[in-house]
């Protein structure tokens, strides 16, 4: 994809890509993106985010672990309890409707009918392989921080995604 020339261009061309080329991202590019993104606003200039970059053989190892773990969960292993819900248990309209529609549209474009649960699960499993991306960024905030610092992380992450577009790269934000 071509590089974005303006912030508007970056916003208008940014999308959540779910099929990446295996081409490695040069370390100097990701370093430049992360350094520039660190200029994102944060309350009291706390810059509460921590970013871990995983690529190469370490990413391959992580993908293998994730694949094994997904298979264990699919087989009924419930030994891990999520620390928090990704979405509210009672996701209400219009948010529930937006989420439902985007899912239906995505599966329709992929040619996967609603009743083909196995095929949908197979596609869902690609989340845990980072959609074939050659690099993954893991973002965290010290658990002693509060909601405002999570907001700071959000501003940082948007900056990262827009700067990636400026570099001609795509991304897909994933919650876990």
Image (cartoon, rainbow, N blue to C red):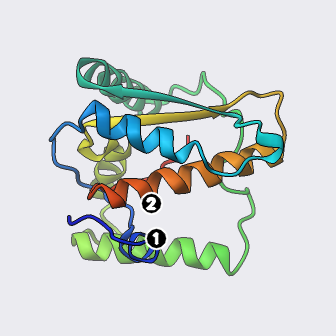
Distance from the alpha carbon under mark 2 to that under mark 1: 7 Å
Residue on which disc 2 sits: 162
Quarter of the image that includes the N terminus: bottom left
148 or 115, nearer to the observer: 148
Determine contact: label 2, label 1, CB under 8 Å: yes
Q: Residue at position x 64%, y 52% from top?
A: 154
Task: Give me the residue at 60% from left, 47% from top.
Answer: 39
Residue 76 screen position, x and y as percent: 49, 30
Is residue 24 shown above or below 90?
A: above
Left or right of residue 27, residue 50 in this image: right
Residue 113: name its quadrant. Answer: bottom left
Camera-near label (2 vs 1) is 1
What residue is disc 1 on?
A: 7
Tag 2: Cα neighbours inside 10 Å, few (<14), some, or many (≥20)?
Answer: many
Q: Quadrant of residue 163?
A: bottom left
Q: What kind of element bears circle 2?
A: helix
Q: Is residue 73 visible?
A: yes
Q: Is 87 located above or below residue 149 in the figure?
A: below
Q: Nearer the viewer, residue 92 or 11?
A: 11
Q: Earlier in the sequence, mark 2 or mark 1?
A: 1
Secondary element type, mark 1: helix
* Residue sitting at x 81%, y 47%: 43
Q: Position of residue 149 (x, y in %)?
A: 77, 43
Is residue 35 placed above or below 168 in the rendered structure? Answer: above
């Amino acid at each position: 994809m071509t590089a974005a020339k303006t912030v508007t261009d970056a916003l208008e061309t940014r999308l959540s890509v779910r099929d990446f080329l295996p081409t490695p991202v040069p370390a100097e590019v990701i370093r430049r993106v992360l350094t520039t993104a660190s200029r994102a606003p944060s309350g009291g200039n706390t810059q509460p985010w921590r970013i871990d970059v995983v690529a190469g053989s370490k990413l391959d190892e992580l993908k293998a672990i994730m694949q094994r773990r997904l298979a264990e969960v699919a087989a009924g292993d419930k030994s891990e309890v999520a620390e928090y819900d990704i979405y509210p248990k009672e996701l209400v309209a219009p948010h529930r409707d937006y989420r439902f529609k985007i899912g239906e549209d995505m599966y329709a474009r992929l040619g996967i009918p609603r009743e083909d649960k196995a095929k949908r699960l197979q596609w869902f499993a690609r989340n845990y392989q980072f959609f074939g991306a050659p690099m993954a960024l893991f973002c965290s905030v010290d658990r002693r921080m509060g909601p405002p610092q999570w907001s700071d992380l959000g501003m940082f992450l948007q900056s990262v995604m827009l700067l990636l577009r400026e570099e001609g790269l795509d991304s897909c934000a994933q919650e876990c």
